[in-house]
Image (cartoon, helix red, strand yellow):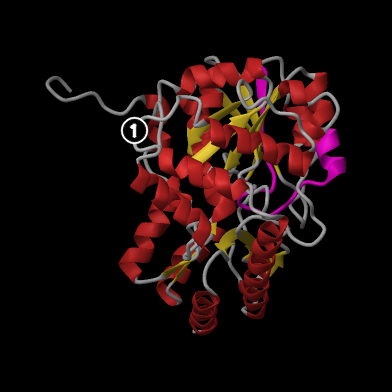
Amino acid sequence: MQGQPPLLVARMREHATSIFAEMSDLARRTGSINLGQGFPDTDGPAEVAEVARACIADGRGNQYPPAPGVPDLRQAIAEHSARFYRLSVDSDSGVVVTTGASEALQSTLLAFVERGDEVVMFEPRFDIYAAGVSLAGGVRVGVPLSGRGLRPDIDKLRAAITPRTKVLLLNSPHNPTGVVFTRDELEAVAEVAMEHDLLVISDEAYEHLWFEDHHHIPIATLPGMWERTVTIGSGGKSFSFTGWKVGWAYGPHELIRAVSAVRQHLSFVSGGPFQYAIAHGLRLPDTYFTEFRQDLAHKRDLLSDGLARCGLGVVPSQGTYFVTTDVRPLGYDDGATFCRDTAHRAKVIAIPHQLLCDDSTVGLPYVRWAFCKQPAVLEQALDQLSTGLAS
């Protein structure tokens, strides 16, 4: 309309609101316990926080840090990848620090996706993936996770590849399902990527959040994959400081140079003192990461067992902060209706998978719950669910 400021560009209109914002707003309006948002309600290691405080007090990192990230953090990321995955990462040219894993993802998509290029991803998926592809002018192509265990279907993946496919966007441990891809599954995905000369963006924000023997395997460690993979990590997820927004991307210097070229024009730099603190965190002993997983596994079991007692069909969580349930045993046809009803009947919030898929029938009966909360919060939520769903 003449005289009015321009409206949101067409490619971003579908992303103007998100299911996470909608359900968080519903939580506020109904006074519900919010098990939809994936962030812890306790802080991470005190010694990591103390490093940040000391840096601020000493003036270390309070001004603009180097655009690729402070050297200490880039070196710590390289050491971490060698320590846990036997990867040789060049801390000078193979790492870029970003404002959270989200910016690493967006920078990588903007660096490599031309208008009309197809980006293939498994569904359901984190909503920022769809927005990132739209920002880049690409075309997203969803491949449904299949079966009762919500596993990757390699035949469907192969069928989704076309001459316009440029990027395969991978996420394991997987949000929202809690699935951790096996070595056999990753090798099959890698075969598809190499056969069609695809770039792989591997979102490994939950790399340390795997349970029992469901070990996380970076796809970049598989033969032939290092050269074509940008791996994304998150300090917030690994150390429970999500508000610090420290993430990174690493890989071959040719790919990281392209990511860095875009990233410098987004937030430019951020979080100087927090970068030093996350570097300290990455060097914590193995016992930290083991105990972190054990604590989350206990919370996972507490919530999963309670959800099963409420009558929901639980898909066992192998990793991340999340457990998925099937709502059909309670007589619901779709997860979105269940989630909105549960907010009013039980004052508890979850996230429906169907709104994290382009084909809503893919995730129709499934719902995601976050267990990265204090046990007392989870127990209260389960009490409310038991009472509310029975009414």
Task: Residue at 40%, 71% (x, y): give it.
Answer: 32
Queried whether the magenta region covers residue 187, the answer comes back as yes
Q: Is residue 163 left or right of residue 182?
A: left
Q: Name the residue under label 1.
A: 63
Q: Quadrant of the N terminus?
A: top left
Q: What residue lies at 54% left-to-right and 80% top-to-bottom? A: 379
Tell me the residue at 45%/44% (across/down).
274
Amino acid type at circle 1 is: Gln
Looking at the image, is 348 positioned above or below residue 23?
A: below
Q: Quadrant of residue 5?
A: top left
Q: Can residue 271 be seen in this view?
A: no
Is residue 268 in view? Answer: yes
Q: For the magenta stretch, what is the residue range?
A: 165-188
291 or 261: nearer the viewer? 291
Q: Which residue lies furthest to the front in this view?
A: 58
- Secondary structure, mark 1, is loop
Does the magenta-highlighted stretch encompass residue 99? Answer: no
* Quadrant hosting residue 169: top right
Residue 371, given in percent of the width and then of the height, sits at: 58, 66
Q: In this view, does 377 lie above or below 133?
A: below
Q: Residue at x 55, y 35 (%)?
A: 72
Exactly how many numbered labels are in the figure? 1
Which of the 4 image quarters holds residue 167? top right
Q: Which of 282 and 31 is in front in this view?
A: 282
Q: Viewer-proximal residue, 216 or 248?
A: 248
Q: Is residue 237 above or below residue 376?
A: above
